[in-house]
Amino acid sequence: MDATHTLREEHQVILRVLDAFEAALGQALDARRVTTAVFAPFLEFFRGFADRCHHGKEEDRLFPCLNRCGMPCDHGPIFVMLEEHRQGRAHVRAMLEQLASADAGDAAAVESVLRHGFGFLDLLRNHIQKEDGVLFNLADQLVQGEQLASLAADYRQVEQQPEFVETYARCRAIADELTKRSP
């Protein structure tokens, strides 16, 4: 077992949804039309699975563990990851705020959803690449022995909480549906 196995698996789910999201964004860009029916499930997945479940485990469990193992939080990889989490939340929030207006045909809202959508897509893909290629490799080297056992127990504790279980299951079903529809 390593400190990041489950997080890497979750990245694969997120990346598949990002591929479907890219296709939806491309279709919306071509049509100059954004609909709630198409985009709301993506935003629900990003808020529930990517942010609450996945980023929650990173921010509440992995990053503090890495800090206890000597990795600083005020600069370096953890600082960058936290900043990118904040940026991603801002993109998703902006899309949510503009979605109803975009669906109603407001051209400025359509542009906003598309701009934030493509921004989020690029941000999250690059973010996952940094985590998988740099941070998680460092984590797997740093977190050993009792720290690793404690982190594994922390993950299990989070993953057994009723809200986590419900959100995770609902969002995995959304991911399955979104990736089934995508070309």
Image: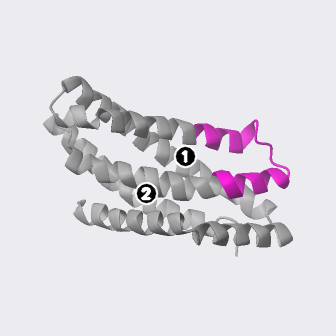
The amino acid type found where label 1 is placed reads: His
Q: Is residue 2 visible?
A: no
SS label for mark 2: helix
Q: What residue is pinned by disc 1? A: 127
User: Quick one: label 2, few (<14), some, or many (20+) residues within 10 Å?
Assistant: some
Q: Quadrant of residue 150?
A: bottom right
Question: Which range is magenta?
Answer: 59-84
Residue 166: give x, y in percent of width and height. 45, 67
54 w.r.t. 110: above or below: below
User: Quick one: label 1, few (<14), some, or many (20+) residues within 10 Å?
Assistant: some
Q: Is residue 168 visible?
A: yes
Q: What residue is pinned by disc 2? A: 15
Residue 146: give x, y in percent of width and height. 85, 71
Mark sitting on residue 29: none
**In the figure, is residue 143 to the left or right of 25?**
right
Q: How many marks?
A: 2
**In the figure, is residue 27 to the left or right of 8?**
left
By secondary structure, the bulk of the magenta-drawn segment is best described as helix
Q: Nearer the viewer, residue 59 or 16?
A: 59
Residue 156: give x, y in percent of width and height. 65, 72
Q: Nearer the viewer, residue 96 or 9?
A: 96
Query: Does 133 lie within the magenta span?
Result: no
Residue 116: give x, y in percent of width and height. 37, 34
**In the figure, is residue 65 to the left or right of 10?**
right
